Amino acid sequence: MSAIYGMCHWGTASYEPVIQNMEEELHKYKIDRFDTKSIEQVEFGCGLQYFTSEADREELPYYVKKKHVLMTADIVLDNRKELLQQLGIEKTNVPDGTIAYEAYCKWGEEFVKLLRGVFAIAVYDFNKETLFLFTDHTGSRCVNYYNGKKGFVFATTFAPILKVCPEIKLSEKWLVACGALQTPDMEMFEELTPYDRVLQLDAGCYLKVTEHSFEKVSYWNPLLRADTMAFSDDMCKQLFLDTFKSCVKDVLRSSGNTAATVSSGLDSTSVASVTAGFLEKEGKKLYSYTSVPDGKMEEDGGDIYDESWGPQILAEKYKNIRVHLVPCEGMDGFTKLERLVDELEVPTKSAPNMMWIDEIYKKAAQAGCKLLVKGQYGNATISFGKLFTTMRCQLKRGSFIQAYKEVRAFGSRHHVPRKKIIKQYMIERKEEKRKEDWLLDSYVHEQLLQKYSIGCVIDQTFETSGKGQCLSMEQIHNFQFDRVNLAQLGMYDTRFSLIHGILVRDPTKDKRLIELCMNLPVECYAHDGIERRIARNYMRGIVPDDILDQYYRRGLQSADYARRIQTNWDKISEDVLEKLSDQKLLKYFDEEKLQVLRKKLANMSEVSKEEQNAICACALNMYSFSVLLNKNGAVRTKVTQ
């Protein structure tokens, strides 16, 4: 993998070079080698990371004078053998970038449809006088771009673009949307970033750019061809297992050890189980990492606070798993936040999770791991499924008897009266149609929320992808392929890969698995009284039963985040309250609400446990915004309207 960057200068072949200035902004990341190439009006660069055995032989940027095509790429291919055969290349150790180059030269821009893996690729075709910018099907390797008066600039991160385009200002629209809700969701608009007109290329898309034209092409959109198959459980199970195992197997190509983030949930344990099985055949270990509380916590019978039992059960079944519990002793959500905002380049709203995610990636890299697998997207694919969603879809197609059978089966399995289930279903359907004021507790200025119609955008999002437990098939599919959500995931995975020098892969986000899950009938997701059924039934025998049969309790990530902050409060309070008193915040956030927040923080021991969680989460978000605004304040004092 790589960090790519470059510029196509418009209007003249005579220009002041910028490529070295762009490269300097990437020196803080763990990159093994930098290379640049300048031809005519085009400058391309690449910061290579050696994740695979072929990576150290990569020649990127790559240029063949006879073909007059220049390419730079951030790429790991999953279908190398297939592409080598199609290209007629006999050598098996050809680097991924070279394969992609030859594929473009043979098939043109359509080549991107044939690539499978994770990538961001820039191509300048001198014969066509056109620059192409590609990202992979799910946007797992993000790339940003800015089309200015002097030229087209692109980079994996924002800093190289900002370095050579000092006219760029912060984007008010993005910041308002990001800060509107106290949730981990940061993105609300496709392609927008914290910087005005600096855009993040959407998943499954590419650009065709000349000095006088600009075209965005969507080359993969599974929503356009989702076609539900008939329900045959044996066939669906075999299709799923074959596809899922292939998705996992194809990512297990690295020059070092393999790590996995593992909780007690269905998604990460499914990925880890299949991964461990493949590695065991090769005599290799799987290094599992699990976030756990710093000290004991009393559970209330609902959520699971300490998820260490999940990986420990896995290790009993798969002897090649080496369990590592990560308590992040003495840390809290603020501990790494200032550094992470700088390196991630966004005001992260998942600070409690970012703390242990960062620590896990660091420890995995120190253990010689070059690859880390996870199952983060599994909530949309392998572990999706609610009874009421199945009922809704069956009722819509007139299968009333089958819907009632589902009620009966669920009631029998979970000892719930049928009347109660039906009543709750009606309540859920009614609640789905009820309009809610999602912004009632927002800290963002009311006029800014109205200016960008944030409430309407949120309503539209819920209408498109659903809310609650009664989704239509269309809403399910929109949830499974959501370019805004994919952009946020790709941004985090790409930057953490750069920060720690470890390739992050999620087989539950593979294009083949998304396509299959969109074609599976709703009964695969919830049927015969079993919710989240794909993982629970189809992974039986692969994932330990103790994990699959955990119906009534789910792990709660960062369960002790407020307790950590309260424990460290005497040491961190001065810094936190100072950040939350930053006048720059008042451009976006209500001063009175910030004052109330600071007062509650200062007297945290006097508020309820539930309110402690809320004010700590809010404080982390505001702190994060303050860091970003101060980082950019010196050179970007104005904000675009």
Image (tube, rainbow, N blue to C red):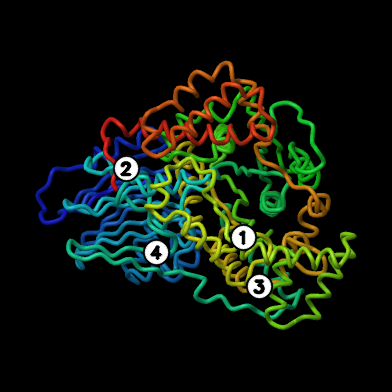
Total marks in image: 4
| Residue holding disc 4 | 205
Contact check, label 2 and label 4, Cβ < 8 Å: no
Name the secondary structure under disc 1.
loop
Name which residue type carries label 2.
Leu
| Residue holding disc 2 | 170
Question: Earlier along the polypeptide chain: callout 3 or callout 4?
Answer: 4
Name which residue type carries label 1.
Lys
Does residue 382 appear to the left or right of 250 in the view shown?
right
Label 4 vs label 1, nearer the camera = 1
Label 3 vs label 2, nearer the camera = 2
Image point (35%, 68%), residue name: 217
| Residue holding disc 3 | 520
Name which residue type carries label 3.
Leu
Q: Residues within 10 Å of mark 3 (few under 14, many from 20)?
A: many
Contact check, label 3 and label 2, Cβ < 8 Å: no
Question: Earlier along the polypeptide chain: callout 2 or callout 1?
Answer: 2
Label 2 vs label 4, nearer the camera = 2
Residue 594 is situated, as x and y percent measured from the top left of the image, at 48, 32
State the residue in front, 435 or 225: 435
Question: Earlier along the polypeptide chain: callout 3 or callout 2?
Answer: 2
Does residue 414 appear to the left or right of 158 in the view shown?
right
| Residue holding disc 1 | 467
Name the secondary structure under disc 2.
strand
Q: Which dot marks residue 475?
A: none
State the residue in front, 226 or 616: 616
Question: What is the CA distance from the residue labelled 4 to the residue labelled 1?
Answer: 27 Å
Question: Earlier along the polypeptide chain: callout 4 or callout 1?
Answer: 4
Label 2 vs label 1, nearer the camera = 1
Residue 7 is situated, as x and y percent measured from the top left of the image, at 23, 50
